Amino acid sequence: MLFHTPAFAVFIVTLVGVLLIVRSDDLRKLILLGASYLFYMWWNPIFVLPLLTTTVIDYQVGRMLEHEERPRRRRSLLVFSLIANLGLLAYFKYYNFFIESVSAAAHAAGFDFSPVLSRLILPVGISFYTFHTMSYTIDVYKREIPVCRSPLRFALFITFFPVLVAGPILRARQFLPELERPIRLRLTPGIVMLIVRGLAKKVLIADNVGGFADVIFKHPERWPSVIIWLATIAFAVQIYCDFSGYSDIARALAAAFGFEIPLNFDRPYAAHNPSEFWRRWHISLSTWLRDYLYIPLGGNRNGQLQTYRNLLITMLLGGLWHGASWNFVLWGLLHGTMLSVHRFWREWRGEAKTVGRTAQFVSWIALQYCVLVTWIVFRVTDTQKMFIALRKFVLFDWNFHIFNLGLGENSFGFTIAVLTAFILLHYAGWRWGELDARIAGAPLPVAVFACALIAMSFVFFWPMAEKPFIYFQF
């Protein structure tokens, strides 16, 4: 069930209607839990089995940790929880990848190895809810949060439908306290406009530029460098608007039920260095990896070489979290390298108190270039086509004969127009504040006029085909 479909509109209206009738908060939470399971089972009812499994296991492990004082026994409970969660994730998401990689290595070494591959479909959102529940057991083990004694609230924390399949990744310490409060249904202008902003990002921008990137990267060998550059920029805008659009809608839906979930994006393309980029991009994942992987590995406490190692391991595993493919591993490794190089440069050069505008602009350009290179690695899963696209991106061929190439004037021109609109709107939001918030707080005639323009945009530019959110596959 996608946020931008009629089925979801019926789902959310029905859910709100039922909650308005019910007065008991426990019953409201039970209805919300049931609706979350229905939302998740819409794709495939069988998907609910691993979700139920991890919920039951970690609830019981948490209750056992509450009464267990023996250190060895506590470690055993934590290890059991981690093996169960990561085992499910590894089987559904990485089993075939691992077997195919071993098979390829065996054949390269001259051995005949033809294993049986799994035919199971990857449960949608498993990477997200696995990290939800792991945060709980780890924090309970470290005695940083109290044990959740309510199976209803714990299950709702794991299963809350706005964030279940594509985040943001919720921490137990963030969301379980929210569930202690009663559900308070509300629909403010700010919530409505945040939903509108998310939908506009997804259907008006991401889906309309994504088709161009799909065509170009399907056969990168056919196109000159300037088209590869345009397709790369189109994908960079697509994945940002697609994912941040989902996060905006998720935050708005949570707020409509009286819950607050964390910001997941903060204008990442305004960053000037790799560290700042990861403080702005997919914040819930980057902070999760920092707190539960990078710091336990040693962080930056044991010297420069250990710090660089920890950065590379963290980002490599962060890349693998995105998908069972070597291009994601390479993507993570590239970002880990960028973070390590930036840290080395900062330590060697020293922290400057003031940085001139020229230096800021140069660092911004350099970062955008590097990020675009990594987006090619992320987007093009075929290794041969990936290196073709990278070669044309890096070794610019200066061929500007872009017409009569079969692109279609409407597709090419419309993509340029949408990218231009994105840049202008993005700049306006940075310069004068988020436009949805300004519209929500504007005088009524101004707000009505702005909403009419947005409605017309939806009518004329809503794509014909429904496209799932990109991060559903992760």
Image: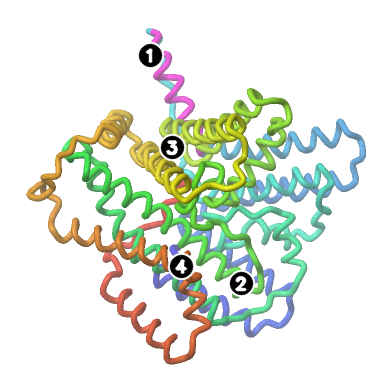
Residue at image mark 2: 255
Is residue 412 depicted above or below 106 in this figure?
below
Foreground label between 4 and 2: 4
Residue 65 image-quadrant placement: top right
Q: Residues within 10 Å of mark 3 (few under 14, many from 20)?
A: few
Residue at 41%, 41% in the rendered image: 366
Q: CA distance from mark 1 to mark 4?
A: 54 Å
Residue 429 numbered tag: 4
Residue 107's tag is: 1
Look at the image and give the residue range highlighted in magenta: 93-109
Which of 334 and 115 lies nearest the eye of the viewer?
A: 334
* x then y, percent, for residue 223: 18, 40
Q: Position of residue 440 (x, y in %)?
A: 51, 81
Residue at mark 4 to residue at mark 2: CA–CA distance: 22 Å
Marks 1 and 4 in Cβ contact (< 8 Å): no
Give the mark nearest the N terminus, 1 or 4.
1
User: Is 61 situated left or right of 211 in this image?
Assistant: right
Whole-angstrom CA distance, mark 3 to mark 2, is 39 Å
User: Can you name the residue that lies furthest to the bottom here?
Assistant: 445
Main secondary structure along the magenta-highlighted residues? helix
Q: Secondary structure at mark 1?
A: helix
Nearer-the-camera pick, 270 or 211: 270
Image coloring type: rainbow
